[in-house]
Structure formats: structure tokens, C-alpha cells
Image (cartoon, coloured by chain):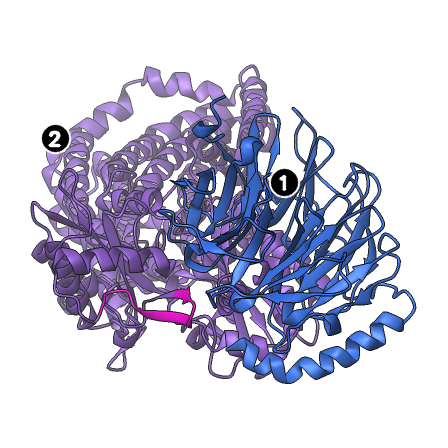
Chain colours: A blue, B purple
């Protein structure tokens, strides 16, 4: 419903985007961008992504919330200059990391997530939904309405790659990642999955026998590429995306992103508290008490911390790991 | 006795006794007929400070906030072990209750919500888009399959914890009420009784019906308060026995009791004539009127027995008693009445009506017990035994009174005052904990183990939302409620308030809009934020439930669920909202307090806090000036008023220690206590002055004062205390609180008058023997 309006607006988006990309660095509008409120409730607020920066966990979420935790320490709230919803976080090195969110906010940290600087924003732009860096310098951001940005200078300047992506309808790009062979994958709305075999300059659309949306794409050390999406639809490719097969499992809820543990074991996080654990071919279904929707998870020591509605949730390590 | 010495007022009544008696009789019949028609009543608007800015804001917006205001919640519970709502029987019972409630008189039919209401829906995202429907499937037939479908719909409806209990063993029917039915205010007692019928009709061994909400509370209050009628009989009986023991004269006892009952009758009759009803608060007035009437009656029969013992005949004794008492009596009663009138400064209608009722009541006592009583007694006379007793007592030395007369002594007075000062300091420190407002959980008007409070506790335990709701009204330009700036500010307010201690949770159109936007984006939580795009906001907000958006689109309600309604919580939360408003009010959004039960309570507390000090100062000022005008002496003012001050301080300390807050129910008591307490002092002081004028030494004068009027004072103090002490057993918590406080004040004012007044007199009054 919303997308019908948006596709008509797409041209304007392109125009705006072109303007911004060549505009000098924008100073944040102080009236519209204010620092995130420090709060004791931040660990229970809506958190949308979690990752590791070295041994540190870093999670982002609504209202400019970024929190981090060192092993066996308490969670701390980072200094963040904005209150926009932050949707994704990624650390290419233990110290340098990037967080992205609505209003095209891109934040950069050089101290493992304790403090953040605003390096890009545009109040009129579609939301950014996922961030991935292949090195400290080179990274990609995907977002709504076909958005795809890249940087080669650790975020100083950003270029649009939208013209290179075969996404004429401007479907949302929900997730981006890389497999062990260096192929880049983007998964998004209406069954769209794209691949770049040359580091992100040329993209091709992959054919999957499904037209529901994907919200996550996960790769394992064994070379598996797994796209997860609406109502528990799960597809796996063992040949870097050339061919895909559906994976059967007992879950019914929409699956968001996945976390890879040792032995290629997966934790796939889903809506309404459902999550799957185990090897891709034999996933077990679990339900989180309280049925909070889960979006992502990360591991620190023996703990798996998932984030979603209600903030942080400790998940037990899957039994199949045979600790 | 020479009639020509008699004052005009005395002759006016005593020269035409039969005419006056007939007049009083006719008046009593007329007002008695009126009194029978007095109805118990209570209304929402009378309990709240209508001119407080919070309430004015709320009243302005009442129509836009339907459903957030005055509603009752009917909880239908599956009672048996292991049973839940997923059974055909349960759903049938719920439907029956829902239908029954919808057609109750006073219920806003179109606004009633329940699982059976088509407006209660579920939503879900599928490959095809947004799916939704009524939570009870169209194909519902009570079969296990359709119950399973129902279960899934409920999980998707977002109503768990709101309309559906967390343990799936009960659901709520929410029934917003109309304030007016057919042009008349909603009759809460009848409505509550109708709800009680619903409860009886639909409760059995399988299901339970629990009911909470203001209307039910008021209904329960009226029912409980009318039980106090029984206490009136008990008080009547106790008083009669004590009166008889005191006077040893059945005639005196009966007649003073009768006159006091006449006073109550007149008071109730006048109330009805003026168009007032009797609400749970003003229910205490008849007790007070009765108690005060008895205390003045005792003065009269006491004086008559003494005069008769000097050998005067009935009529002369009655005349002399009247002559000796009428100035002090009228002064005392007028100062009572004016003292009560100070309650008019509190802008809460129940308190104002209580002030009018109590003032009327004490005013009629002037006629019934200062005039009618001696008139009647002038025919009947005091019994011989009682006269003999008075005579013997007068002639024989009284060791008790003699000992008490040492309170005027130079060696006792300083110690008394020092002790009083210490007590005052102690009381002042102990009253530091005195709180404004209600301190208990649930409905503090009722006892914690009352049916209502048990029901309320059940809802608090099994549902996510508390019953203590504060609504911030966010005003936007017309059609501006969908603007990003307004919604963004509302969203920020919500988060800031969630971070305030005492706020359990929040709900607002901004929050719902965010969820709808996520819903439009296939349920992806990464989209769950306010879009700056106006089209997205318009579309999302067209999905808002009624009550969250008004027709003119110029009001956004932000609902704060509070942990409790303690005064501190309310102060902290409202302060936080006000600070937010100062920083964030703009042309897009203005943040205004307050609706919801907690909002109204916050306003009431503020009004009471404002009025409390003001009222105390005023009541003391009135009492002091009346005393000054009568006795033309500032010394009289100190002697009479200073002991009252100690009582007030100690009363506040008592309230703090017993956890009784200053609230609609107890604030009047503080004023009443001063008003009534002054009576003792006035009677004692006027006698003391009289004896001093006769040239007696201070101690001797006080000894004689005690022998004549001190006995009456101590007797009435005890009688009144026992009379109102019966309230401690009232099912209504605040009536019990009032009972405790009044008992304390009656007793302590008596002690103050007998013990401290002479000590002050020692320093302030001239002792003729030393002149």
C-alpha cells in the first residue's frame, strides 16, 4: 500500500539523492537533530541490531539508542548525537564501526562504539536498513526504495549505486552481506536477491522461486548463503547463489537475520518470539517467553544476546552445539 | 426573679411559650416531611475541583476523550481450576454480559468494547499485504477449531494485557458512561445496583463477574455510607444512657435528646428544601449536628438543675438557664457555623455542600437547643432527684474539681504551658510526614478487603495496564494532529515519561502510528518510527482506534499508566509533564494536563494543598475575631484559641502517624474540629469571667467554673467522642478516618479547654484576690 505512493515519489528521491551526493558535508540541523536521551530503560527499548566490536557487544535501536557491553561488564549507553531510529550496526575492525538509520543517518565510531559522530544525514531520504563493510575503508549501506550507497574512504564520502542495481520498482533493500568467496549479496522486498561478484560495481538479480520479502541474508564458513523472510520462508544456496532451495522447518513466523555459531550452526531470529537453532537442514523451533519479536543476535563468551522488542534478550546456547 | 431584668430576647420567647411551641411543632412536621425525601447522591463532577486548570482543560475536551473519562470495566473470569476463556461457554457468557451491559441505562452504547465488539480487531502481514479482521471470526460457532482461530487472533490483536488477561482466564468489557441520561445526571446508586444485578445474574460456579470503575465505586460508597444510619441509632442510644447517668433525670435526658434529633431533622429538611442530597461525605453532618446539639443541650439542663437547686420554680429556672447561656451559646454556634463556612473556599462541590449543610445544622441548634429546649423544660421541669443532686453537689466540696482548679496555680501553670509547648513541638515534628491525597492502593475510600478493592487488585494483577491513568492532552491546530512535528513531540514526551519514576507505561496515537507504519512495511520493526512523510502519517493515522483521535483532529491524548496514585507520584509525574510542556510547547503542539483518574486526583490534591493552609488560617481568624468581639479582650482570644492550636497540630501528627492523608474527606474534619472545639473554651471562659467579676480569686473562680460548667464540658466531650467513635466501624474507610479524627479532636479539645485555658488565664487574667 505504501509502496504505490512511494514508487511515484521515486524520481524525486533520485533527484534529491543526486543533489546530496555532490553537496559538501552537511552540518546537522540542530533544531531537528538532538542528542539521544540517556536512560536507564535503554536496554528495554526497541533494539534493532547487535554486533561485535572485538570482544565488545554493540546494539542499536530506537531514539538514537546505542549501547555496548564488554565481557562480564554492565551495559553502557553510548554518546550519540541524534535521536533517529538506528537500524543497523557493523564494525569492520574492533575500533572503527558504523551505525545507520532513518533520515539517512550514518554514524561513525572510532572508539569501539563508546561515542559516535554523525557523518551523513538527510531528513527527506528513505531509511537506511543495513550496513556492511568489507574493510575499514570500503562499505555499503542499503535502504528503503532501492537505496544502495557505498564509500571507499571509511564514510567520508558516499556514492549511490542505485543505477547499478537491477531494481526498477525501487523495492526495499533489507539486508546486505558477503560470503567466504567475497561475493556480495543483497536481499529485499518481494523475493529480491542480488549478487555482486566484483566487489560491488556490477550487480545481478538472482532467481528464487518466491516473491515474498526477505529480511535477512546470512552466510556460513561452509559457503552456505541463506535468505530468510516473511512467514518463515527460508532459502539456501550452496553454490554462491546460482541455485536455491527452500528449507523446511517447524517455524511459522517471519524470520529476520541470522547468527552463525561454530560448526555452521545457525540461530535465526524471528517475529513474535520465534527463533530457530541448529544446522540449516535440521532447525529446531523455540519460543521466547513473552513472545517479543527478535531481529538480530550476537555472541559474547557463552552468551547469545538477541535484540528486538523489549530490548535485550538472553537466548540459551543451542543444545546441538554439545557444549 | 424580676421579669423586667430579663433581656428582650428572653421575654420574646418566654412570654409567649405556647405560640412558640406550636410554631416549632409545625416547623418540625414540615421539615420532617422534607427530611424524609432527602436522597443519597453523588456525582463525579461534585468530587473534583472544577476551576482547577487541569479540570478546566479536561472539561473543555471531555467530548474528545470519551472512553478515557468515566467508564466501568466489567471483567468476566473463568473461575474453575485450569479453565480459560477458550471455551464455548465462556464466550457465550461474555456475549451475554456484553449485550446486557450495552443496554444498561447510562452506558454509552456505541462506545462499549469487548471481544464481541466488531471494532476490536487483529492484524497480520502476509505476502499479499495487510490482513485483518474481527478477533471473533465471522465463522465462529463455538467449535474447537473456531476457538483455536480465536486464540490466534487474540495473539495478533495486541489486546493481551489490555482487554485480555495475561493468563487468558478473563477478559474485560469496557463501558464508557454518559454523564446525563434523559437530561438528568446519571444516578450512580441505581446504576451501581444495575451492575450488581448483572454480577448476580452472570456469576455462578463457573464464571465470576468483577466490576471496577468510578460509577461502581460511588455506588458502593453510597450503599456503605447509608449503613452509617445504623451508627446513628447506636450513637443515639449511647448518648441517651450517658445523658441519663449524667442528669439522673429521665425528662432532661429525653428532652435534650429529642431537641437534638429535631435539630438533625430540621437540618436534613432544609437540605432537601435547598435541593441538596446527602452524599457519602455530607453523611457525617447529621452526626455532627446531633453531637453539637447534645453538647449545648447538656449545658442547658445542667444550668437548669443548678438554678432549680437554688429553689427557683420551673419557669424561672428555665429563664435563668437561658439568660446565663444564650450569649455564650449563640457565640459558640455562630463561630461553629462561620468556621464551617470557611470550607466554601475549597473549590470542590462536595466540600462546599458539606459546609452549607453543617452551617445550617449548627444554626438550627440555636433554635432547637438554646430556645426550644428551655421552653420545653419550663413546662416539664427537672426531676427532684436531679435538683437534690445539684444542691448536694453545690454544697459539698468536690475534691476532683478542687484538684483541677490548681491548673490556675502559679506552680502548675508554667509546667502546663511548658508541657503543651513540648507536645506542640513533638506534634509538629511528627506531622512532617503528613501527606496530601490518598495513600492506599486501589480505592482508598473503601476498606482494602472490600469487594471493590479485591476486584481492582485482580485487574491490576492480571492486566498490564494499571487503573491509575493520567492523560496528557496535546492540542494541535485543527487538522494538525497528523503533523510530524506534533507526533514527534508526543513520541518524545512518551519516552521521557517512561523514564520518570512512577510511570509504568504509556500509550499514545504516536505509538500506535509507529506500529501501523511497521505493519504497512510487512511488520518490519526497522520501520517502526514516525515517518517525516505526511502521506505515510495520514495513511497510518487513518487506522487509529476511536478515542485516540477526534473529529477535528486537534487533540492527541497521551495516556500514562501510573504505578499508584500516591500524592508524591502524582506530583513528580505532573511536574515532569509540565517541564516538558514548557520546553516543547509550540504552534504545532501544546501539552496540557490532565484527564484520567490520576489527572483528576492530581488536580484535587493541588486544590486541597492550596486550600489547606488558607482554610486553617481563615478558620482561626474567624474564631478569634468572634471571641474578640464577644469578650472584647485579646486575653480571651489567647485563652480560648491557643489550646485549639495544639489540638490542630496533634491532629495532623495523628494523621501522619496513622497514614491518613489530607483529602476531600479529612480536610473538612480539620476545620470542623476547630469550630466545635471552640465551644468548650467559650463556655468555660464566660463562666470564669463571670466568677472573677464577682470578685473571687482566680483559683476559686475556676473551681466554681468547673463545678458549674466544667462538668458539662467534660461530659459532652466524652459523649461526643463515643458518638462519633462508632464511625470507626464504618465500611467506608474515609468515614472511619473521619471518626478517628473527630473522636480525637473532641477529646483533646476538651482536655485543652480544662487544662490549658486556666494556665493561660493565670498569666493573662487579673486575679481580683491579688488586686
Q: Residue at image x 58%, y 82%?
A: A5
Residue B540 picture location, percent across and down: 51, 74
- In the visual, does B196 lie left or right of B613? left
Neighbour class for label 1 at 10 Å: few (<14), some, many (≥20)? few
Q: Give the chain of mark 1.
A: A
Q: Give yes or no for residue B131 being in the magenta stretch.
A: yes
- In the visual, does A283 lie left or right of B276? right
Residue B102 picture location, percent across and down: 20, 71
Q: Are marks 1 and 2 on the same chain?
A: no
Q: Give the chain of mark 2.
A: B
The answer to whether one can see residue B435 in this image is no
Mark 2 = which residue?
B385
Which element type, helix, strand or loop, lies under badge 2?
helix
Residue B484 is marked as none
Query: Taking A186 as reference, is B461 above or below it?
Result: above
Query: Taking B619 as reference, is B693 above or below it?
Result: above
Q: Which label sits in the foreground, 1 or 2?
A: 1
Mark 1 = which residue?
A40
Which element type, helix, strand or loop, lies under badge 1?
loop
- In the visual, does B425 lie left or right of A231? right
Farthest residue to the right: give it.
Answer: A24
Q: Residue at image x 61%, y 52%?
A: A240
Q: Nearer the viewer, residue A78 or B48?
A: A78
Q: Residue at image x 17%, y 39%?
A: B82
Q: Distance between the residues labelled 1 and 2?
A: 80 Å
Stretch in magenta: B124-137
Query: Taking A26 as reference, is B504 above or below it?
Result: above
Q: Give yes or no for residue A151 being in the magenta stretch.
A: no
Q: In which quarter of the image is residue A311?
A: top right
Residue A21 picture location, percent across and down: 85, 70
Residue B1 picture location, percent across and down: 27, 48
Q: Is the magenta stretch mostly helix, strand or loop?
A: strand
Amino acid at each position: 500500500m505504501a509502496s504505490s505512493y512511494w514508487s511515484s515519489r521515486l524520481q524525486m528521491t533520485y533527484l534529491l539523492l543526486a543533489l546530496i551526493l555532490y553537496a559538501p558535508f552537511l552540518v546537522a540541523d540542530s533544531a531537528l537533530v538532538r542528542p539521544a536521551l540517556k536512560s536507564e530503560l535503554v536496554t528495554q527499548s526497541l533494539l534493532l541490531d547487535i554486533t561485535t566490536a572485538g570482544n565488545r557487544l554493540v546494539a542499536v535501536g530506537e531514539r538514537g539508542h546505542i549501547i555496548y557491553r564488554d565481557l562480564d561488564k554492565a551495559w553502557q549507553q553510548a554518546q550519540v548525537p541524534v535521536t533517529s531510529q538506528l537500524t543497523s550496526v557493523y564494525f569492520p575492525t574492533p575500533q572503527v564501526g558504523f551505525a545507520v538509520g532513518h533520515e539517512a543517518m550514518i554514524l561513525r565510531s572510532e572508539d569501539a562504539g563508546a561515542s559516535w559522530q554523525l557523518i551523513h544525514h538527510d531528513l527527506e531520504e528513505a531509511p537506511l536498513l543495513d550496513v556492511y563493510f568489507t574493510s575499514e575503508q570500503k562499505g555499503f549501506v542499503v535502504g528503503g526504495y532501492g537505496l544502495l550507497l557505498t564509500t571507499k574512504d571509511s564514510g567520508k564520502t558516499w556514492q549511490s549505486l542505485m543505477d547499478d542495481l537491477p531494481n526498477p520498482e525501487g523495492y526495499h533493500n533489507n539486508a546486505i552481506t558477503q560470503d567466504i568467496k567475497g561475493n556480495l549479496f543483497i536481499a529485499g522486498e518481494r523475493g529480491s536477491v542480488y549478487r555482486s561478484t566484483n566487489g560491488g560495481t556490477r550487480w545481478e538479480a538472482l532467481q528464487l522461486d518466491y516473491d515474498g520479502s526477505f529480511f535477512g541474508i546470512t552466510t556460513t564458513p561452509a559457503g552456505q548463503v541463506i535468505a530468510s523472510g516473511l512467514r518463515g520462508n527460508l532459502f539456501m544456496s550452496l553454490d554462491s547463489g546460482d541455485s536455491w532451495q527452500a528449507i523446511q522447518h517447524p517455524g511459522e513466523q517471519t524470520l529476520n537475520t541470522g547468527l552463525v555459531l561454530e560448526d555452521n550452526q545457525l540461530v535465526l531470529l524471528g517475529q513474535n518470539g520465534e527463533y530457530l537453532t541448529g544446522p540449516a537442514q535440521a532447525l529446531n523451533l523455540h519460543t521466547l517467553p513473552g513472545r517479543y519479536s527478535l531481529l538480530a543476535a550476537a555472541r559474547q563468551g557463552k552468551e547469545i544476546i538477541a535484540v528486538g522488542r523489549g530490548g535485550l534478550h538472553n537466548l540459551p546456547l543451542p543444545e546441538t552445539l554439545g557444549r | 426573679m424580676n421579669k423586667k431584668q430579663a433581656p428582650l430576647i428572653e421575654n420574646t420567647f418566654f412570654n409567649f411559650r405556647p405560640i412558640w411551641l406550636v410554631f416549632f411543632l409545625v416547623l418540625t412536621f414540615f421539615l420532617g416531611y422534607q427530611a424524609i425525601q432527602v436522597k443519597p447522591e453523588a456525582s463525579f463532577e461534585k468530587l473534583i475541583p472544577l476551576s482547577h486548570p487541569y479540570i478546566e482543560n479536561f472539561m473543555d475536551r471531555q467530548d474528545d476523550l470519551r472512553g478515557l473519562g468515566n467508564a466501568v470495566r466489567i471483567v468476566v473470569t473463568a473461575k474453575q481450576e485450569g479453565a480459560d476463556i477458550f471455551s464455548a461457554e465462556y464466550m457465550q457468557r461474555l456475549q451475554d454480559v456484553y449485550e446486557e451491559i450495552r443496554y444498561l441505562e447510562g452506558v454509552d452504547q456505541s462506545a462499549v468494547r469487548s471481544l464481541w465488539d466488531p471494532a476490536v480487531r487483529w492484524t497480520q502481514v502476509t505476502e499479499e499485504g495487510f490482513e485483518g479482521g474481527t478477533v471473533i471470526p465471522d465463522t465462529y460457532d463455538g467449535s474447537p477449531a473456531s476457538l483455536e482461530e480465536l486464540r490466534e487472533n487474540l495473539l495478533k490483536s495486541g489486546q493481551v494485557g489490555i482487554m485480555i488477561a495475561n493468563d487468558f482466564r478473563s477478559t474485560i468489557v469496557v463501558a464508557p458512561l454518559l454523564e446525563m441520561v434523559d437530561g438528568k445526571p446519571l444516578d450512580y446508586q441505581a446504576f451501581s445496583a444495575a451492575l450488581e444485578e448483572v454480577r448476580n445474574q452472570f456469576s455462578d460456579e463457573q464464571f465470576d463477574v468483577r466490576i471496577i470503575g468510578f460509577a461502581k465505586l460511588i455506588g458502593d460508597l453510597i450503599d456503605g455510607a447509608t449503613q452509617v444510619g445504623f451508627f446513628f441509632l447506636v450513637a443515639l442510644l449511647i448518648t441517651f444512657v450517658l445523658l441519663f447517668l449524667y442528669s439522673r433525670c429521665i425528662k432532661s435526658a429525653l428532652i435534650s435528646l429529642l431537641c437534638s434529633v429535631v435539630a438533625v431533622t430540621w437540618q436534613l429538611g432544609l437540605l432537601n428544601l435547598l435541593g441538596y442530597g446527602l452524599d457519602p461525605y455530607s453523611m457525617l453532618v447529621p452526626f455532627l449536628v446531633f453531637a453539637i446539639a447534645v453538647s449545648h443541650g447538656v449545658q442547658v439542663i445542667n444550668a437548669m438543675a443548678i438554678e432549680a437547686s437554688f429553689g427557683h420554680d420551673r419557669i424561672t429556672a428555665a429563664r435563668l438557664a437561658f439568660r446565663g447561656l444564650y450569649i455564650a451559646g449563640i457565640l459558640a454556634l455562630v463561630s461553629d457555623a462561620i468556621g464551617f463556612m470557611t470550607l466554601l473556599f475549597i473549590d470542590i462541590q462536595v466540600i462546599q455542600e458539606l459546609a452549607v449543610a453543617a452551617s445550617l445544622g449548627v444554626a438550627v441548634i440555636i433554635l432547637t437547643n438554646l430556645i426550644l429546649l428551655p421552653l420545653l423544660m419550663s413546662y416539664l421541669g427537672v426531676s427532684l432527684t436531679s435538683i437534690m443532686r445539684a444542691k448536694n453537689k453545690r454544697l459539698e466540696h468536690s475534691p476532683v474539681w478542687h484538684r483541677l482548679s490548681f491548673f490556675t496555680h502559679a506552680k502548675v501553670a508554667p509546667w502546663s504551658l511548658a508541657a503543651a509547648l513540648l507536645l506542640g513541638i513533638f506534634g509538629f515534628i511528627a506531622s512532617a510526614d503528613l501527606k496530601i491525597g490518598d495513600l492506599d492502593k486501589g480505592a482508598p475510600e473503601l476498606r482494602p478487603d472490600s469487594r471493590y478493592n479485591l476486584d481492582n487488585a485482580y485487574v491490576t494483577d492480571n492486566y498490564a495496564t494499571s487503573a491509575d491513568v493520567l492523560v496528557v492532552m496535546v492540542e494541535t491546530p485543527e487538522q494538525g494532529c497528523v503533523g510530524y512535528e506534533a507526533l514527534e513531540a508526543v513520541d518524545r514526551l512518551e519516552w521521557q515519561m517512561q523514564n520518570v519514576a512512577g510511570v509504568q507505561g504509556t500509550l499514545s496515537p504516536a505509538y500506535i502510528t509507529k506500529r501501523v507504519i511497521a505493519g504497512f512495511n510487512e511488520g518490519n520493526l526497522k520501520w517502526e518510527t514516525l515517518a517525516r512523510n505526511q502521506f505515510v502519517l495520514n495513511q497510518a493515522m487513518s487506522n487509529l482506534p476511536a478515542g485516540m483521535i477526534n473529529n477535528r483532529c486537534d487533540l492527541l491524548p497521551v495516556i500514562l499508566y501510573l504505578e499508584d496514585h500516591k500524592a508524591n507520584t502524582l506530583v513528580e509525574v505532573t511536574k515532569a509533564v509540565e517541564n516538558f510542556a514548557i520546553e516543547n510547547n509550540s504552534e504545532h503542539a501544546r501539552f496540557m494536563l490532565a484527564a484520567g483518574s490520576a489527572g483528576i486526583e492530581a488536580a484535587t490534591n493541588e486544590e486541597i494543598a492550596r486550600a489547606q493552609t488558607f482554610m486553617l488560617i481563615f478558620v482561626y481568624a474567624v474564631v478569634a475575631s468572634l471571641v474578640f468581639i464577644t469578650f472584647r479582650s485579646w486575653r480571651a482570644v489567647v485563652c480560648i484559641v491557643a489550646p485549639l492550636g495544639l489540638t490542630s497540630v496533634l491532629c495532623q501528627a495523628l494523621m501522619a502517624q496513622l497514614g491518613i492523608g489530607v483529602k476531600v474527606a479529612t480536610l473538612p474534619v480539620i476545620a470542623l474540629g476547630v469550630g466545635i472545639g471552640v465551644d468548650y473554651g467559650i463556655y468555660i471562659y464566660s463562666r470564669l469571667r463571670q466568677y472573677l467579676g464577682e470578685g473571687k480569686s482566680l483559683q476559686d473562680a475556676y473551681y466554681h467554673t468547673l463545678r458549674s460548667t466544667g462538668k458539662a464540658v467534660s461530659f459532652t466531650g466524652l459523649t461526643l467522642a463515643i458518638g462519633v467513635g462508632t464511625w470507626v466501624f464504618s465500611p467506608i474507610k474515609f468515614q472511619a478516618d473521619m471518626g478517628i479524627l473527630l473522636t480525637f479532636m473532641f477529646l483533646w479539645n476538651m482536655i485543652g479547654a480544662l487544662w490549658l485555658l486556666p494556665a493561660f488565664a493565670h498569666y493573662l487574667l487579673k486575679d481580683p484576690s491579688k488586686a
